[in-house]
Image: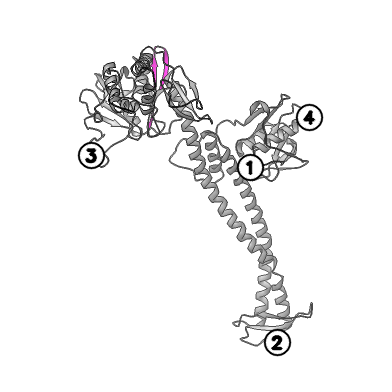
Amino acid sequence: MPFDGMAAYAAAAELRRNLILGKIEKIYQPQPEQLLFNIHTKEGKRKLFISASASHSGIYLVDTAPENPAEPPTFCMVLRKHLSAGRIVDIIQHENDRIIEILIETVNELGFNVNKKLIIEIMGKHSNVMLVDMESGRILDSIKHISIDVNRARQILPGKAYEYPPAQSKIPFTQLTEAQLNDILSNEFQQSRAILQHVQGISPVLAETIASGASPYRTLLSIIESVDNDTASPVVITDDKDKPVDFHITDLTVYDSTYKRIYFDTLSGAAAYYFTNRESSNTVKQKSNDLMRLVDGHLEKLRLKTQRLSEDLHKAENADKYRLYGELLTANIHLCKPGDKSVRVTNYYDGTTMEIPLDPRYPASRNAQNYYKKYGKYKTAVKEKKLQLEETAAEIEYLESVAQFTERAASVEEIESIRQELVASGYIRYRKQSKRPARSGKPKPQSYTLPSGRIVMAGRNNNENDWLTLKHASSNDIWFHTKDIPGSHVILFTDGSEPSEEELFQAASIAAYHSKGNSSANVPVDYTKVRYVKKPAGAKPGMVIFTHNRTLYVNPELPPEVK
């Protein structure tokens, strides 16, 4: 648990040093369970981020602000009404629990000074943020409403008196004496468990770190003093794939040497790094999975459509028999009797005998006309079905490229760009509740430098492919794309001079890397000058035609300096 009582203690101390007497200028609610405060202090502007999300509960300072919704939620409006232009008087931790209180002095509608309290409970799925009137002790509003149906013992609703969570019979770590700790440890075989059960504000990993020290009390005291003296070295623990697994105000001995450590000057820096990197990877995975399900659904329908069109085309291409039936019936009307369901005639083309089905409701002449009509209908259908098959194949090719970009997306911004592309292409309905138009964003294709110094760029989605090939590249630059495999448009910028054979192979390897064939060997990559790449009228994003191309067979690989 990243934010235990000790981390909250350090967070409160850091926020006190940075925000006391700061003036609240702006309040935002980027997500339903997140808040962002712009605070003007004597050292400059600070951004305070608060999250009550189950997977991202915490409070810390940030440098960059997340994007805000077009319309502020109700709780944000309540905070703006009561706290805008308010001044932060103090920031305290309740006992040594995971509760931080921000005391704010502000002015009400009548011009009188009033005191409000923003209480942040950092408790995993039970996290919450409450605005409380200090005079009455009542809740003005909360980011999560907890009714009696959810919790009979403690409701969090506007108008209710605020009550702290039930107290635990533990000793706050700031009040713990050496004698008390020695007494606790003397009665338990497993010391870390004893600390966890009897000392408030200590998480399991911190309890194990304290217990592993030569003197547990001195270890605990040194952590507290490092916070009080602002000499702590907050750390983020990462696994072998550089994914954050934990962070704290001090190093944690429970993680052995196989884990990497990244040290920070502030707890806010460590918390921001931990949550940003951990949450972004989870968010990207979730959003990409949602997008992949949508794309796969469209692809499944298109492949089924292709199968049905192919069957219809096969029938249409075998329609010559209906013309033959019409001819032979016309020549042998005298053999047909009213009410016959079939007639046997001689095929004068090859001398064989064949049986022609008849509709007994109609005379032979009408049956012959019906066969001629069916023949004409199928011959017309051949052209239509072939055209529909071509359009469906192009649509499948486009969506397969979208799927490939979605699988390789590394950020939420890339996923959102792909989503906007699908909205513009009509695959996703535009969500009308958002009044603010979607931000297109400046294209940011992947950029690589070859050992020779030449620049190579690869599009991250189809819109970037179009921009890179049709707007950014010059006519003499070299365009690369995997042959019959979904992938990025890759441009080798030549600056007007001919590239070497080695540079062509290196750029082709980058194109193979940015394709669905990146796990294969000897991937075919087409290349030609940009002047020979054209976009057909009405084609979907990223879809082009090209001529004067050659093909290289390469292994997917990035230049040495960017591996």
Evaluate if marks 2 and 3 touch, with contact meaning CB atoms under 8 Å apart.
no
The majority secondary structure of the magenta stretch comes to strand
Of the residues shown, which amino acid type is indicated by label 4?
Answer: Ser
- Mark 1 to mark 4 CA distance (whole Å): 26 Å
Task: Give the percent coordinates (x, y) of residue 426.
Answer: 54, 46
Of mark 4 and mark 2, the one earlier in the sequence is: 2
Of the residues shown, which amino acid type is indicated by label 3?
Answer: Arg
Crowding near pointer 1: few (<14 within 10 Å), some, many (20+)? many
Secondary structure category for the residue under label 2: helix
Q: Residue at x 34, y 22 (%)?
A: 84
Crowding near pointer 3: few (<14 within 10 Å), some, many (20+)? few
- Mark 2 to mark 3 CA distance (whole Å): 92 Å
Task: Give the percent coordinates (x, y) of residue 151.
Answer: 25, 39
Q: Which mark is residue 500?
A: 4
| Quarter of the image where one finds residue 335 | bottom right
Q: Which residues are magenta?
A: 33-48
Is residue 510 depicted above or below 342 in this figure?
above
- Mark 4 to mark 2 CA distance (whole Å): 79 Å
Residue 106 visible, this angle: no
Secondary structure category for the residue under label 3: loop
